[in-house]
Amino acid sequence: MNLIPIILSGGSGSRLWPLSRSLRPKQFLGVTEERSLFQATLARLEGLVPKVAPIVVANTDHRFLVADQCLQMGVTPQTLILEPVARNTAPAIAVAALQALAQFERKQSSSGQARGQTDSRVPAVESPVLLVLPSDHVITKTEAFHASVRTGYDVAQSGALVTFGIVPTHPETGYGYVKAARDGYASAPLADVSRRTESTPPLALPVSAFVEKPSLATAEQYLRDGGYFWNSGMFLFRADVFLQELAAHNPAMAKACQRAHSSAAKDMDFLRLDAEAFGQSPSDSIDYAVMEKTDKAMVIPLDAGWNDVGAWPAVWQLQSQDTQGNATRGDTLLHESQNCYVHADHRLVALVGTQDLVVVETSDAVLVAHKDKAQDVKKIVEALKAQERPEADLHREVFRPWGAYDSIDHGDRYQVKRITVKPGARLSLQMHHHRAEHWIVVSGTAKVTIGDKEQLVAENQSVYIPIGERHCLENPGKLPLELIEVQSGSYLGEDDIVRFEDRYGRA
């Protein structure tokens, strides 16, 4: 099976604030289990095909998060493509398709097939088939998912653009729908297609239409009619066919993506798209750019325990619930409360006499919302961004390629951080114009450079870095280095950093 998974990881997940922030969105969080949604997507590929590394498309701000979580899963992406700006799913898939095709052609040209050494009775493979997956979905029935992908592979090989339509379980108004053509399933009433069981082999149907999010009455009618499926955002098609259809239906996007890819630069383990060219691409979803316009669209009904984890009620549905319908994570106490979701990260959260609430506690923010209004959490994020508040983008704990820091206290002219440095990791050689720093090592050993002097600092020892002095911190050991940093000065913002050298390409 000549299949390449394409994992899209550029979403913001604003409806899952305050757990999800723009610099650490929901796909990189353990929303429903200990591993992140992104890591669960990687794990879902196991057993589908012989081990094939995916191509990952990510926001440049998330590059080290992606790399670190792939490393934790033992996965090395074929390519990790960095988007300089967000341009929705169609351009992201286009550059991934271009990269997959380029890699495939290079492999073919260096193989025996290119030298005319293959069996002439075996037809040459024209293009890899791409399995496009968002990185923030949950699928609980992996085997059913695999079966549908195998069916879709054969359909995609024939030149179709395949989408997976989720068999609806209730009249949902928060999803778009895919309508199957009535002449595509002649052996039984089309309504039966939406009620297929796990033991029924997957089938592929021509797409009649893509339908916007309906009213409740319309969604109820869809269920009665049958043949309507939730639009999953997952696709399967040949790279060359998709690019041909994109060029036919959105030539401006196709040209911009081609320029961005052809001018991309290799940066460590990343492929950076040309910012100017990619920024000129129209911003559009694959549905609007291609799927609604092509005559090659096919839908495969999928009943695999799918959930897009689009808002807090979806998280509640995915968790085990007590006899009162409550689902909780963390240190919680509930009394005479029903159908609530409570997430406690750092302290005890107690509810008394409540119903249908979402309560999410993090180190720097608390959300209380009625489940019926949970989709409007994004309005809070919009307000935070308008006020330029950091809670829209950052958690109190901030992850860096070398480790993480947690701002545990701050006040007028001072800030206290707990810093963790991974074994072998090194911060940039830097200086600050407006602050001095004290470092106190709590555990491990630090290799510290201040000016021209280099020294080892052990547990319970400290150093002082004056304003304007070049300095660097490194963990030379095999265990994590933990220290307390006390900053003092007239300005303590993260933008008061001048980097001179940086192994992570940030200088």
Image: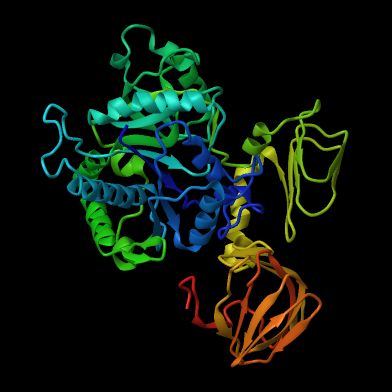
* Lateral position of residue 187 relative to residue 400, left or right: left
In the depicted structure, whether residue 119 falls above or below residue 444: above
Q: Residue at x 51, y 59 (%)?
A: 62
Q: Residue at x 60, y 76 (%)?
A: 494
For the question of whether residue 409 can be seen, the reply is: no
In the depicted structure, whether residue 191 falls above or below residue 246: above
Q: Quadrant of residue 363?
A: bottom right
For the question of whether residue 361 can be seen, the reply is: yes
x%, y% of residue 144? 48, 23
Quadrant of the frame with the N terminus: top left
How many discs appear? Answer: 0
Q: How is the image coloured?
A: rainbow
Q: Residue at x 25, y 35 (%)?
A: 294
x%, y% of residue 48? 43, 31
In the depicted structure, whether residue 365 falls above or below residue 44: below
x%, y% of residue 165? 42, 27
Please state which of residues 106 and 492 is positioned toward the viewer in this rendering.
106
* Lateral position of residue 185 relative to residue 380, left or right: left
* Lateral position of residue 234 relative to residue 29, left or right: left
Q: Residue at x 65, y 38 (%)?
A: 315
Please state which of residues 15 and 136 is positioned toward the viewer in this rendering.
136
Q: Quadrant of residue 180?
A: top left
